[in-house]
Each structure stands twice: as structure tokens, then as C-alpha cells.
């Protein structure tokens, strides 16, 4: 690590944070135009990226996670951090050897004929070395970086301070982001990645889950040599999917490799259970036989049974072009905010689905991506924090497929894979048929009539929501009035204490006045923020 000192790391991160805060508020006070704001966010992105690369460690992973939040962060900022890679210079071999001796004992060499002293791969948390067992078997030895536990602990303390400030000070685009939940999820994932015992168990689970697929390989684990800080695995030779020249020499086409990727990952995204949350090109390789090799199971996520059901319904609805049902699934998943207009979202989905992928060849893809990010920002859409890592997995695999088979149409590649998966689900295929029937004109008329009949109930719900808003407003107003009265009482007490020269009275009154005045200012700020929030919600 370039910077291990706790105080230096904290100073740099907090300095970056306050610098960003000040620049944002300075632009708000001066009411800068949109063009200037885009330039500012681009500059902030460059500064943010450079600081994270300087500090390395956990912070690079934070940048990678934030790069998936186009629903919350400005496009100009996302553009600067979206290709952040987790590449860190390897540690000195003497430090790695010290860890191995501590984990295996001073005679650790008895297990191996040899261990290469140059790292095959080096990331922010672990490094990989190649070794040969006494029986001649080649293995991969994954070792946790020296002092990484202390560095991560320091970074989490820094991030908890930053998250607290952001949650209370920064004017977020939509005001719905729960930073506490996001921070908790990031911490859970990173802490799991720090424990190689958990990664070993995860690999065993994945191997069991995918054992029926002959198109995928997962390394076997040598449990007797593995510890919480060292993981010994089967060595698998593979090609990077970005190595086009070598890929073209394989016995399978790029399109077939793309389909195999989808066959491996689609069940992870659609079925309850764990999924690979970090499938970047260094962790997803292909063997000379064309089999997909999955590596590095430190970062995984988990999909609940309930969410998996809604995701399946969403895909089925989109393929059947049953957009009302698709919108219902989006609402249930929490992707659409409660005030989103169903008909508007249905029209957008219909326009998106009828878009011809062949038109992409004639478009500026960067401009298209920025336009999509702008659309996400404008719509009442936000990806729930529990889907951050699922979204990362999906977006990463999509990027690999786009690079692997740029001429192929993603929907055309994915549809047969999905239908094949659906056929394996037994009775679920009849659900798809039902979805298709619901999208036909007769059922659309039925849906309209149902909406008309349900209108009174929806109106009652809207009235109840408005009553709740009025109740919340009343609470704020009453609290303000009470704090204002308490402040006046404190000021009167100060005057009385000074007049009577009674120190205890005026000191006690001063404390009451200071406390109540602070509370009054905070309450006014919260009420103002809440009123703006309500106004924005009504405009959606």
C-alpha cells in the first residue's frame, strides 16, 4: 500500500470530502448553469479517482461500486470512475513469506516443491502466487496482503465519517439514498472478502450449484492447506475474454462463448441464492476447450426468494411485452419510486423494447450511454441498495459480452438462453404463456376496466397519503413553535439573571436558550428540506 499511516489516509479522504462539499455549495450559491455543473462534476471525478488510486485498499472498491450508481450520481462523475481497476503493486516476497510461515509453520516448504516469488495477480486485498505441490500438482496460492486488516479497519472508520457527512450535508439528486444501508452492505461484502475461510466455503457451494453444467469450471480447494489468510486452489489455465486473437483460435465462436456466459450467470441473477458479484475479465476466463472458468469468489451477493420471483416476472413480462405487469414487478422490486406514473413507465418500456439494436452501429455509443444516464436521473427510478452488487454483476457481464461479440444483438443472444432456462423450471413456462396472453388486446381492455374499477380505492390511498403529509407538517410546525417559545423563555431568564446578578439563573437560562435555538434552526432546516422534497415528489 502506498499510504498505510492512519492519520495520513484520514486526512486525505476528509480533505477530498470537504473540498467536494465546498465546491458544490459554491456553485449552488452562484447558481451556475448546467454546463458549468457538468464540468465541475468531471473535475471532481478526476480528483476522486486520483485520490483513490493514491490510497488504494478498500477505497478503490468503493469507487468501483459508486461507478454503478448512474441512478444517483451525475454522468460526468460516473464517466471518470467507471473503468477503475483493482490493480495494486505486489508486496515484497519477504512479507508474503512471513505470512506463509505464520499460517503453515516454519516448515511450510515441506508441502511444496516450489513457490514462485513473483505474484501472478495482485489486487487491493489479496495476491496470487503459483506453486507446485510435492506430487507435482500446480496450485494457485492466494495470500491476504500484509497489514490489510488494519488498513481496511481504518478505511471503514473514515468512510463512516464521510457517509455521516454526506447523508446530512450533501444535496442528493433524489433524497432517497439510504447511505447507512449501503455502507452496511459494502462492509459485509468486504469483511467476507477478507475471510478466506468464507471464500473457500463459497467456492464449494458454487461448485455444487453448477456441477450439472459441463461448460463451466471452478477450481477445487485444498482445504488442508487453506486458512483464514491463505487459500490454496487448483491451478486452471485460461484465456482472457478480451484476448480476441487467442479467442478466435478456440473451437467455439464468440457468439457461443457469449451464450455460455449467459447460461452460467443467468441462473445466478434469477434464482434465489448467492451470485458472483465481481466477474471482471480477470476473474472470468475461458479454457482451450471453450469452458468458462470462474475465479475469485471473495465478493458475492445473495438474492432472496421474493426478489428472485419478481426478477423472473420482470423478464417474462418484457419478453411477452406485457408492460403493465413489468411495471408492477419494478414497483415490487423498489426500482420505481411510489409516485411514479405507471402509464409513463409503460410507454418508456415499450419504446425501449421496440428499439432496433442494429441502429447502435450508426450511433455514438458514448453519447447514447450519457443520454440513458440522463434519462435515469430524470425518471422516478432508483436502484435499491440491496441490488448494488447484483447490478454490478449484470453490467460487468454485459460489458464482457459487448466486447466479445460486438456485432451480435444482446437480446437475440439472451432470449434462447432465457427460454432454455425457463423450460427447466417446469410449471414456470406456463406462467410465461399467461404473461403473453395478458399482453394481447383483449386483456389490455380488461386491464383498463380493472384500473377504472380500482380508481376509488387508489383515490382513497392518495387521500390517506396526503393526510399523513399534513400530519408530518403539523408535527414540524408544533416543534418549531415550542422551541421558539423555549428560546424566548431562555432569553428572558438571561435578562432576569443579569438584572439580579444571579449567576446560576443566567447561566442555566443561557444553556436553555442555546439548546432550544439550535433545535429551532435544525427543525427549520429539516422542514425546509422536507417541503422541497414534497414539492419535488408532486411534480413527478
Image (cartoon, rainbow, N blue to C red):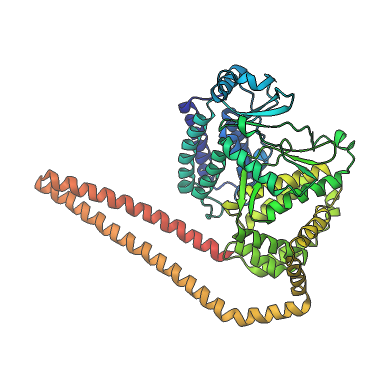
- Residue 502 position by quadrant: top left
Q: Is residue 63 visible?
A: no
Residue at 52% in and 33% down:
152
Q: Is residue 507 left or right of residue 333?
A: left
Is 4 rendered above or below residue 475? above
Residue at 73% over, 69% down? 431
Q: Is residue 371 above or below residue 345?
A: above
In this view, the residue in front, 410 or 217, is 217
- The residue lying toward the viewer, choosing from 117 and 277, is 117
Percent position of residue 396, x then y: 71, 44
Residue 46 lies in quadrant: top right
Establish if 467 lies above or below 163.
Answer: below
Judged from this view, the residue extending furthest toward the top is 94
Spot occupied by residue 133 in the image (x, y as percentages of width and height): 70, 24
- The residue that appears at 72% across and 63% down in the rendered structure is 348
Q: Within the image, what quadrant is residue 326 found in?
A: bottom right
Q: Which quarter of the rendering shows the C terminus? A: bottom right
Amino acid at each position: 500500500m502506498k499510504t498505510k499511516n492512519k492519520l495520513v489516509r484520514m486526512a486525505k479522504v476528509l480533505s477530498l470530502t470537504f473540498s467536494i462539499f465546498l465546491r458544490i455549495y459554491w456553485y449552488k450559491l452562484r447558481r451556475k448553469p448546467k454546463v458549468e455543473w457538468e464540468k465541475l462534476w468531471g473535475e471532481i471525478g478526476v480528483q476522486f479517482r486520483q485520490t483513490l488510486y493514491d490510497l488504494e485498499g478498500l477505497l478503490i472498491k468503493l469507487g468501483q461500486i459508486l461507478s454503478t450508481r448512474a441512478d444517483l450520481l451525475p454522468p460526468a462523475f460516473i464517466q471518470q470512475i467507471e473503468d477503475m481497476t483493482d490493480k495494486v503493486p505486489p508486496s515484497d516476497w519477504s512479507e508474503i513469506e512471513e505470512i506463509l510461515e505464520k499460517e503453515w509453520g516454519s516448515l511450510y516448504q515441506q508441502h511444496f516443491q516450489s513457490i514462485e516469488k513473483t505474484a501472478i495477480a495482485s489486487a487491493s486485498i489479496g495476491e496470487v502466487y503459483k506453486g507446485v505441490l510435492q506430487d507435482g500438482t500446480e496450485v494457485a496460492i492466494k495470500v491476504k496482503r500484509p497489514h490489510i486488516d488494519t488498513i481496511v479497519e481504518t478505511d471503514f472508520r473514515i468512510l463512516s465519517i464521510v457517509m455521516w457527512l454526506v447523508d446530512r450535508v450533501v444535496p442528493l439528486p433524489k433524497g432517497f439514498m439510504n447511505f447507512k444501508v449501503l455502507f452496511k452492505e459494502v462492509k459485509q461484502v468486504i469483511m467476507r472478502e477478507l475471510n478466506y475461510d468464507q471464500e473457500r466455503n463459497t467456492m464449494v457451494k458454487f461448485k455444487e450449484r453448477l456441477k450439472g453444467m459441463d461448460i463451466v469450471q471452478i477450481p477445487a480447494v485444498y482445504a488442508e492447506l487453506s486458512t483464514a489468510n491463505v487459500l490454496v486452489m487448483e491451478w486452471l489455465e485460461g484465456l482472457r475474454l478480451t484476448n480476441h486473437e487467442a479467442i478466435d483460435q478456440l473451437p467455439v465462436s464468440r457468439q457461443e462463448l457469449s451464450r455460455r456466459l449467459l447460461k452460467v450467470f443467468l441462473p445466478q441473477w434469477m434464482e434465489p441464492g448467492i451470485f458472483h458479484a465481481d466477474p471482471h475479465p480477470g476473474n472470468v476466463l475461458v479454457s482451450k476447450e471453450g469452458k468458462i472458468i470462474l475465479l475469485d469468489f471473495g465478493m458475492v451477493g445473495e438474492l432472496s426468494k421474493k426478489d428472485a420471483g419478481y426478477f423472473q416476472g420482470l423478464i417474462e413480462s418484457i419478453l411477452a411485452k406485457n408492460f403493465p405487469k413489468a411495471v408492477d414487478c419494478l414497483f415490487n422490486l423498489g426500482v420505481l419510486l411510489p409516485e411514479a406514473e405507471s402509464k409513463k413507465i409503460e410507454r418508456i418500456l415499450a419504446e425501449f423494447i421496440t428499439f432496433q439494436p442494429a441502429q447502435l452501429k450508426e450511433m455514438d455509443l458514448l453519447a447514447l450511454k450519457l443520454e440513458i444516464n440522463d434519462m435515469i436521473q430524470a425518471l422516478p427510478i432508483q436502484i435499491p441498495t440491496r441490488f448494488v452488487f447484483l447490478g454490478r454483476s449484470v453490467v460487468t457481464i454485459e460489458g464482457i459480452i459487448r466486447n466479445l461479440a460486438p456485432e451480435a444483438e444482446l437480446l437475440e443472444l439472451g432470449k434462447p438462453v432465457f427460454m432454455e432456462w425457463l423450460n427447466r423450471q417446469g410449471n414456470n413456462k406456463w406462467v410465461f404463456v399467461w404473461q403473453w396472453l395478458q399482453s394481447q388486446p383483449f386483456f389490455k381492455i380488461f386491464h383498463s376496466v380493472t384500473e377504472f374499477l380500482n380508481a376509488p380505492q387508489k383515490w382513497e390511498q392518495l387521500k390517506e397519503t396526503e393526510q399523513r403529509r399534513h400530519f408530518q407538517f403539523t408535527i414540524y410546525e408544533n416543534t418549531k413553535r415550542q422551541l421558539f417559545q423555549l428560546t424566548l423563555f431562555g432569553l428572558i431568564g438571561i435578562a432576569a439573571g443579569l438584572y439580579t446578578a444571579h449567576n446560576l439563573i443566567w447561566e442555566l437560562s443561557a444553556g436553555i436558550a442555546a439548546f432550544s435555538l439550535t433545535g429551532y434552526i435544525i427543525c427549520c432546516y429539516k422542514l425546509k428540506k422536507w417541503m422541497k422534497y414534497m414539492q419535488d415528489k408532486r411534480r413527478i
